[in-house]
Image (cartoon, helix red, strand yellow):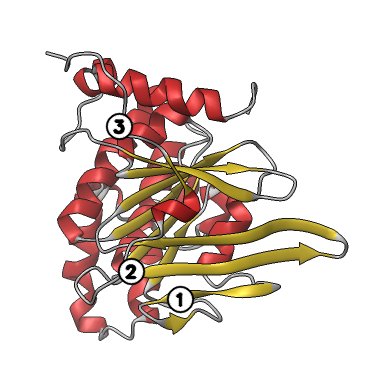
Amino acid sequence: MSAAPGRPKQARTAGEAEGTTVTQANAPVLSVNGLDFTVGSLNILSDISLTVHEKEFVCIVGASGCGKTTLLRLMGGLLSPTQGQVQYRGRTVDGPSPELAVVFQDYGRALLPWRTVAGNVELALEARRVPKGERAPIIRDMLERVGLAERADAYPIQLSGGMQQRLQIARCMAQAPQVLLMDEPFGALDAMTRQTLQDEVARLCADAGVTVVFITHDLEEAIYLGDRVISMDKHPGRLSETLTIDLERPRNQLTTREDARFLAYRHRLFNLLPPGH
């Protein structure tokens, strides 16, 4: 039964959300401090500061063009900030690292078409220098976790879109990351596949104890998956508010989405973002 209708926990400005005293016990896994990103005369991101803690699932939403993808790429070390810094466990992120895995929306371009399903997962193990004789059980385990064990010898072109995205996620998880950075990974998929993958990712990351930063334009997806949802403004991109999501886990596609708290969070976020975001 849905909880009684009520207001969601008070939304805070992004700065207020990060204003708590940090102790060793709750020191952030990932922190962004005073980040600016400029291309030519265009200021894309301005004064971005946020922290992400161990095993958190943080979703970032905002209008198209507000810089969500740029922020994620900066967090993953794929771009360098104009000003400010990104830190992973207190160490400056100045390039890609195995601890930070990125899942892209365009799974077709992320996968290697000349490698089999198993071969794509093996790529992550090669990068980790896992001895060849130890790879087969790891590959099998990863593929079983995403429901692709029976397609190990297939090639990406022989898979559906949802299967290709599962494969990209399996390869990233085989990397044994501490943080999974996901850039609208389900945006190109149909509604049923998207919901299935939402549940699979939530389960996989919880089982592995992986911290997640998840970019999406879908407000309901952000609420369903997130422990916190951070909204962004644009021109230039700034963090505006942080909403703490107080919904029990594991979540359910039917009962969670019908919960009065879920609907209240949706209403709050809808009012924060411009129409047609």
| Kind of residue at disc 3 | Thr
**Residues at badges 1 and 2 in contact (C-beta under 8 Å)?**
yes
Q: Which mark is residue 28?
A: 2
| Residue beneath disc 3 | 196
Q: Nearer the viewer, residue 79 or 107?
A: 79
Residue 161: % across, % down = 46, 38
One can see residue 161 in this view: yes
Q: Give the secondary structure at mark 2.
A: loop
What's the distance in space between the residues labelled 1 and 2, CA to CA? Answer: 9 Å
Q: Residue at x 44, y 25 (%)?
A: 268
Q: Give the secondary structure at mark 1.
A: strand
| Residue beneath disc 1 | 87
Kindly report which numbered mark, 3 or 1, lies closer to the viewer in this rendering.
1
Q: Vertical placement of 196 versus 71: above or below?
A: above
Residue 134: % across, % down = 19, 79
Kindly report which numbered mark, 2 or 3, lies closer to the viewer in this rendering.
2
| Kind of residue at disc 1 | Gln
Q: Earlier in the sequence, mark 1 or mark 2?
A: 2
